[in-house]
Amino acid sequence: MNLSLIKNIGPKTEKTLNKLNIFTIEDLLTYYPYKYNIIRFIDINSANSDENCYILAKIISNAKVSYIKRNFNKLSFLASSNDISFNVIIFNRVFLKNKLTIDKDIVLVGKYNKIRNVFTASNILFNIEDNRIEPIYHLTDKIKNSNLENFIAEGLKLDYNICDYVPDIFNNKYKLLPKNTAIKLIHQPRNIIDIKMSKLKLIYEELFIYMFKINYLKQNNKKVLGIMKKIDKNYIEDFLCNLNFKLTVDQEKTIDDILNDMQSKRRMNRLVLGDVGSGKTIVAIIAMLANYTAGYQSAFMAPTEILAKQHFEVIQNYFENYSIKVKILTGSLPKKNKEMIYSELKDGQIDIIIGTSALLNADATFKNLGLVITDEQHRFGVNQRSLLQNKDIIKKCDVLYLSATPIPRTLALTIYGDLDLSQIKTKPSMRKSIITKVISEKNIKEMLLKMVEELNYGHQMFVVSPLIEQNDELDVNSVNLLKEKLNKAFKNRVVIEVLHGRLKQKEKDILMLEFQKGNINILISTTVIEVGIDIPNATMMIIYNAERFGLATLHQLRGRVGRNNLQSYCYLVTEDTNNLRLKVMEESNDGFYISEKDFEQRGQGDLFGVKQSGELAFKIADFKRDYKILMQAKIDSEMYLEKSLYKENLLYKNIIEKINFLD
Ligand code: ADP
Ligand code: MG
């Protein structure tokens, strides 16, 4: 249903809501608050000027308007509360003037300065409800929390029916709220129990659907036949002898798993989980080599063009002395070149094609595609997974996923339950641990000295900051401000550039390329560099406002350095130097250890990149926080599937159609 049916939503507001991914009434109603403010009125006597508070008051004088400058005005009036009268001021709310009539009861939100006897209000509420619970939503510019609250309230009045995906047996078993009730209460809870019950329902539902899909895929994958490949092992042995390093035990084990899959009659559907720098690329290369010896083409997909280019260079190098033809296909190639590549893929001249996932969306046809690999798989979700597997051209292909999300094994087995799993835990032995230090900005001198030292060696470094523009309210060191500061500190003697998500792809590519070539000494960026780029000459990672990042992101970021045999350093700059998460980073370089710790420290966190990824971005559930519910949903959905109960449920028929698994 259309958003415009809701009172006060015009075309402009609709556009703003679209930015929050709200396109329909259902989207609006399922846009859940991420936390609640519990409003408790306090006595004006205990109010102060440091903390926001809620005061019940009565208006005792008419409001006066003063215009301070353009776009800046002030309303002031007298109010009383508990026999104390005081001045109230509120900025830029001239439109409230007529509502502020003498003797009216209102709720003042803001801070009270006792000495001046002035209450500076940030908001005035006219609905007086005792101990109200205010839902707080993620917002974007031009929309206020109260706006969203009102739109949702209007939406709820429409009695719009939202499908309940929890099967009756489980609704009854756990006494879950009906979906519509849960939706209403999550936005308008009357008490803590309402919050708890509505969340439980919605979280369980989300996880149940997720686990149902996973289990469904798992059941079907078992049945899917692939190609029984004849692999030339001598050829692979030869290749391995020419490598200038020895494979780690886990790399060898993983390669064994992969070769076995490829030789069996079942199709391979395997996930390689390995920490950053554990050497997943070489494993993928050997899989492609094996596939080549069996007479098939391979496709290797990376999440970004930068990464695709890097893989292309590495892979081409490895196969320099082999008659294996490797090509890259990216969106930015001229049309003519693309068409050339298409035709070479079709007649089988190309053995290995590298690109982004657009590779398979494009009209590429292959002579005999036998293996598809996706790198950094944690960026893709279960729907994309099934889509990939169902593409006609790869229906029988072996599929291999690489992911740098070291998560506890039991969790991996659950959320990636449709895939077989290989883990690479051991790291190449020449790797040195990255020395990690948490420092406050006051003690930054030590870090600057280390930077000078490393710059003198000709080494490069990354500086990461969470935001693009200076934002007073958040007081975050933005990347631009950092550039200024660092230019000052280094007296403009080194080349410092800024990379952020708002740059055009081309600009980003150029910057990365220049950095790779060594023409940039310090690259300041937002987290866009998170994914897999290899700059062996970079030895320092400096992360500002480190407390704002989850352990997973911090670990991924740190993994950008230490990719050679040089000693590398990571500085976590923060005012919160006792932060437990940051301590874990100081303590260990081991992704699996860190992920266990991340898991133990429940609450806020970003479970190793899993949450950022497309399909896994749940609206309300969180694998880590809701682990117990996840496990229950796993068991329940297995039962639902095994007993074929889903066949009588239209909603699940639809889900399955969407998973669109073709036999
Ligand atoms: P990731 O798992 O993060 O994708 P890469 O595959 O990019 O890691 O490997 C990082 C670096 O380690 C590469 O330069 C690669 O050549 C090197 N490497 C991989 N395996 C080994 C090994 N067994 N011994 C030494 N170096 C290795
Ligand atoms: Mg990689």
Image (cartoon, rainbow, N blue to C red):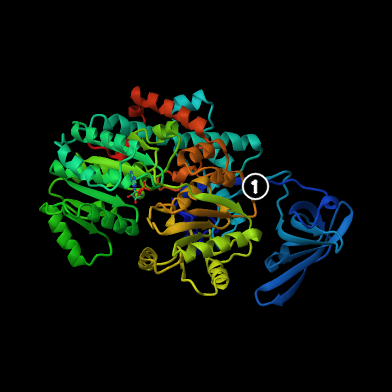
Residue 343: x and y, percent?
13, 58
Secondary element at image label 1? loop
Residue 632: x and y, percent?
47, 27
Q: Which residue is mark 1?
A: 578
26 or 498: which is nearer to us? 498
Left or right, 527 with reference to 76? left
Residue 158 seen: no
Q: Given the current orientation, which residue lies at the most extreme bottom position?
A: 69
Quadrant location, the C terminus: top left
Residue 158: x and y, percent?
52, 46
Total numbered badges shown on the rendered structure: 1
Amino acid type shown at disc 1:
Asn
On screen, 492 above or below 131? below
Residue 281 seen: yes
Q: Given the current orientation, which residue lies at the most extreme left position?
A: 347
Question: Measuring 34% from the left and 59% from the top, which residue is drawn there?
Answer: 306
Left or right, 221 with reference to 232? right
Question: Measuring 49% from the left and 57% from the top, which residue is drawn there?
Answer: 540
Q: Quadrant of residue 444?
A: bottom right
Left or right, 218 with reference to 120? left
240 or 525: which is nearer to us? 240
193 or 444: which is nearer to us? 444
Question: Measuring 20% from the left and 45% from the top, which residue is drawn there?
Answer: 239
Question: Measuring 45% from the left and 62% from the top, which residue is drawn there?
Answer: 460
On screen, 491 above or below 283? below
